[in-house]
Every structure is written in C-alpha cells, then in structure tokens.
Amino acid sequence: MSKPRVLVLSLGGTITMVPSDSGGITPRLGAAELVAAVPQLGEVAEIDARSPLRLPSPSLPAAAIVDVAGEIARAFASGFDGAVVVQGTDTIEESAFLLDALIDSDKPVVVTGAMRGADAPGADGPANLLSAVIVATSAQARGLGTLVVLNYDIHAARFVQKSHTALPSAFLSPLAGPLGAVIERRPRFYVRVNRMPALPVSGGPPEPVLLARIAMGADGRLLGALPGLGYAGVVIEGMGAGHVPADMVPALAELAEKVPVVLASRAMTGPVFTETYGYPGGEIDLIKRGLIPSGFLSGLKSRLLLGLALRSGGGRSAAVKAFEPYQ
Ligand code: ASP
C-alpha cells in the first residue's frame, strides 16, 4: 500500500540550530537533514522535504508565513495528504494561527519545532518531527485546522501559547487544554474543534497592526500618533476582562474613530467580557466607543487576524466579521 504524502517545510529555529564559529547556536540544518536524522519517518510517510528559509523565528515575517500557506495550498491541490511546518518555537503560536486562518482545507497542517538545539543532549527535535508527521498523516486530524505538536502534545493553533522559555513542555493551551497526544506512535484525540472560516491566501500579508499592552497608570499619549505612523489597526491588551485606566478612554475613543481597534486581554487566558463592567474604561464603555472584542483570542493572535481582515480595505466591518467566530 502506498504511504501518505507529506510536505515538510523547514523555516529554521532551534530544531535546525548547531554551534556556529561566532558563538552560540544558529539555524544551519535544512529539512532534508532533519528528515534524514529520523529514519522511522520512512515507515510513516513519503516525504518531500523543502527548506524555503533558515531563520531564527523572531525574524520570520508574517509575509513569509502567508507564502508558506500558499505553498501548502498548492501542495494539497497536487495530491499531498498533509503538511508539516518546522520553525522556531518563539513565534509558533503566531505562525500556526496565521496558517489556521489562511488554509482552506481539511487536510492536516502541523507546526513543530524544538526547545533544544539539534546537537544538545536529549534533543527534542527528532521526536517532535516524528510526532508531527504522524499527526499529519492521521485521518482523525482532518478538519481540526492547523495543529501544533511538541512534547507529544497536540494543540489547536487558536489556543496554543509558548508558556516557558526553556522546558520541552513549554507549549500549553491554557484556555481549553491540548486536543490530544501522540502515544505509542498514534495520535489520540480527546477533544475536537471545528475548523474556522478561512480568509483568502491571495490577499497578501497582513496590514500593519500595533499590539499595545496596557499597564497600571498608562495614559495612552502615544495612541494618537499611530495612524500617522502607518498602522492600519491597533490591538489593545487591556487589563483583566478588557479594561483600561479611565484617563486613557478619550484617546482610545478618538483612535477608534480613525482605525479599527480590537480589545483583547493581557491576562494569560479567558474571553474578553462584553456586558459586565460599567465604569469608565470598563469593557462596556470601550465597546460602546467602537472597540471590537477579541473574544477568546490572545493579543498576539488578534493582531494577526486584524491585519488579515484589513487587507481588502474592508475597514471596521471586515474586522468585526473576522472576530465573530472567536466570541
Ligand atoms: N528559541 C527558539 C526556538 O525554539 C528560537 C527561534 O524561535 O527560532 O526555535
């Protein structure tokens, strides 16, 4: 019987890093070397290994992930059964969310990486790559949207967050938990989610959106300058269920008249409220003044969704529509 065909696209990250002459580890390995280091992959899938980039993930532009989404869409159209994207863990929660928002297919798309360098004792890259390919070939992984697989855990892109700087168990889905785990080389799904509606890949990279985290005593004096700096939208990471200091409200209201402003929370997780707190700077006040609640999306993910929604020039109504499924 022929094996499933899986596209493995490597973009860099710690999983590809080995010591460099200039000190420290840097991204040097490509997808073919990563795949060759895990002979068990040959038992699972027929792999096409490609290395479009070799970057540390803090330097990955969102535009590159939109290109990756296009490459995966073409691969699916030409008969591939699943896709694995390998990249740095620092921005996995963002890349995976972008792919989730852009890929219009039930075929599995899995993002993975590693917390330890390729030549570190106990390197986690090989096990993570094997788990990712196993999930990418699984019929049960179809229709769940983009998944993130590390440390045997299977997370939905919409929930996953990097929650530690060092541990192989750094990835958590604090709102809903992981969907399942890879155990005895088989994905076990305990929870299922629906695929979210896809936005067009052909629309290009997200528009520039600023993410602003609101701290005690913040006064918002920078907010008025943002549209002039070229920001098409702003995401506010408010306190708790979506709150800001009262002093900041006039500047925020003025900003929301110029560009779409989304209200997320700086809390680790949980939805933004819409109908509880009635004080100035509370969520009822801010929503009345035009801010769009992010639902359960984190500030990082909200920033990308707003940037994608604003590509077509649809303005505030396109933004409201894009956030509806996440409320
Ligand atoms: N620490 C990162 C990683 O785990 C580096 C990066 O994101 O590229 O891959």
Image (cartoon, grey):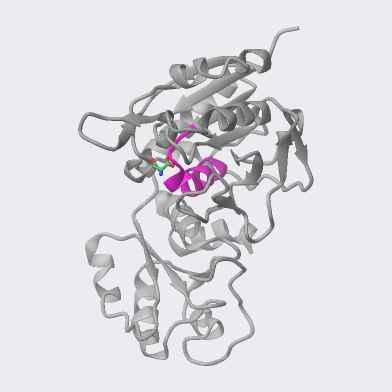
Which quadrant of the structure image shows residue 283?
Answer: bottom right
Which residue is at a point 64% across and 64% down the rendered structure image? 327
Q: Nearer the viewer, residue 241 or 34?
A: 34
Which residue in the rendered view is the most extreme toward the left? 22
Name the quadrant of the N terminus. Answer: top right
Q: Give the image location of residue 183, x and y in percent.
A: 74, 34
Which residue in the rendered view is the most extreme toward the front? 121
Residue 326 colored magenta? no
Q: Which residues are magenta?
A: 86-101
Q: Give the image location of residue 184, x and y in percent.
A: 75, 30
Left/right of residue 64 with respect to residue 74 in the rendered view: left
Which residue is at a point 41% across and 29% down the rendered structure image? 16
Q: Splitting the image into four quadrants, where does ligand 1 fall?
A: top left
Q: Is residue 233 visible?
A: yes
* Looking at the image, residue 68 lies above or below residue 311: above
Left/right of residue 168 with respect to residue 59 in the rendered view: right
Which quadrant of the structure image shows residue 77?
Answer: top right
Does the magenta stretch mainly form a helix, a strand or a loop? Answer: helix
Q: Give the image location of residue 273, x and y in percent.
A: 61, 76
* Looking at the image, residue 322 lies above or below residue 156: below
